[in-house]
Image: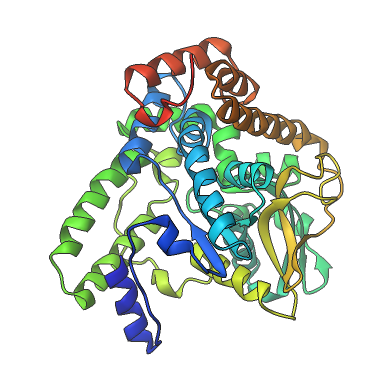
Amino acid sequence: MAALGREIARKLGVKLSLTAVDSVEAAVEGCDFVLSSLRVGGMAARARDERIAIEEGLAGQETTGPGGVAMALRTVPVALEHARVVERLAPKAWLINFTNPAGLITQALCQLTQVKVVGICDTPAELFHRIANALGMPASEVRCDYAGLNHLGWVQRVIARGEDVTAKLLGNEAALRQLYHADLFDPVLIRTLKLIPSEYLFFYYSQRKAYRNQLSAGASRGAELVRLNSELFTQLYSEAPAKALETYRRYLMQRNASYMRLEAEAGTAFRSAENEPDPFELPTGYHKIAVEVMSGLVSDQPRPVVVNVRNQNSIDDLSSDDVVEVPCVISREGVKPMPCGQLPESVRGLVLAVKAYERTLIRAVVEKSWPVAQLAMLEYPIIGQWEIAQSLRKVWSECDYEHLGYLEN
């Protein structure tokens, strides 16, 4: 990956020093920004999480449902350990959290450390761009009022060139079907909600459909990514940097083309990516959000970005210390969430329940308690049954989840 980074810099004509190091301490010391993207247990753990969820009768997905619970239980302790290194060796640094489940991890870091942290996700920005494309307008001329939690947010209003076009968009079935990578939501659902859900709401609103499509496909996306990644790295190790960069570009195109297709449509997630745009030229993506956030934090010119931060007084229904995903004004002065008011009644209960689950799961990590982790799963709407929580605990133990060994009986 370091060699790929150097090749990208060379092609761009950018002079920079890119160094791979063998410890968190060496990477962090003296930094202004620390970008954290962890996958504890690797992609194999994701595939195993998703398979276990499917065997328990629920959709397998890395950030929602049982897969999200397992990922959080593995990841929170390591994310906290890294954050404490940042506290010690780069106390003035901003920690930009990419690590999933991004909202829950950011909540844990805000709650249990003193590090300056902001969580990022490209899901809202991707939805905003698709809304602008559906309207046939540049994204710069469209504003979307958005609020929620990470992977649990909604666009409440769309303003195009100063005009509220929400009703017009909701009434256009063809436009609504352009808003996602795959055919996720019935336009009647969107019109009845009078809200445009972000794509991960599919695992709440169509849980059974996602599960059945995974059964039909005989796999989860994580299982297919294990195969794809294995082939990728075998190839990258054998190629010169210029050739490896082209290989990696094609890989990203194929991966981007696969997004949500297996869960929504069954069949393999990895189809031809011939007509996919160049991933390095896309107007959205994690890299774009990260650069926008970092640029804002060193600028006198405020800029709006949707990120995961402490609520303060943004969403009326949540406490000030809850981490939410909302539009923020970012500048040298920090990250300031914009007022969003009350959540619509049709989604308020879901948001409150998921936030309760996040808080309880973090408590389970702090207390090293399996029973509290099971309570979190009981509070989590996607799981919501004590017997399933007990079964998941038993299966995870039998699968020798070494990264969950810190949890006591």
For the point 35% across and 39% down, which residue is it? 41
Q: In the displayed image of the protein, which residue is found farthest to the front?
A: 88
For the point 24% across and 45% down, which residue is it? 227
User: In the figure, residue 245 lies in which quadrant?
Assistant: bottom left
Camera-side residue of 193 and 97: 97
User: In the figure, residue 40 lies in which quadrant?
Assistant: top left
Q: Is residue 185 visible?
A: no
For the point 52% across and 10% down, which residue is it? 387
Q: Is residue 56 above or below residue 104?
A: above
Quadrant of the drawing holding the N terminus: bottom left
Residue 113 placement (x, y as % from top left): 64, 47
Residue 322 placement (x, y as % from top left): 74, 42
For the point 50% across and 32% down, which residue is it? 73
Residue 269 placement (x, y as % from top left): 34, 46
Residue 249 placement (x, y as % from top left): 31, 68
Q: Is residue 271 visible?
A: yes
Q: Is residue 323 left or right of residue 96?
A: right
Q: In the displayed image of the protein, which residue is found farthest to the top?
A: 387
Q: Is residue 12 left or right of residue 378?
A: left
User: In the figure, residue 252 lies in which quadrant?
Assistant: bottom left
Figure label count:
0
Camera-side residue of 272 and 279: 279
Camera-side residue of 260 and 237: 237
Colour scheme shown: rainbow
Q: Is residue 162 above or below residue 398?
A: below
Q: Is residue 293 above or below residue 204?
A: below
Q: In the displayed image of the protein, which residue is found farthest to the left?
A: 238
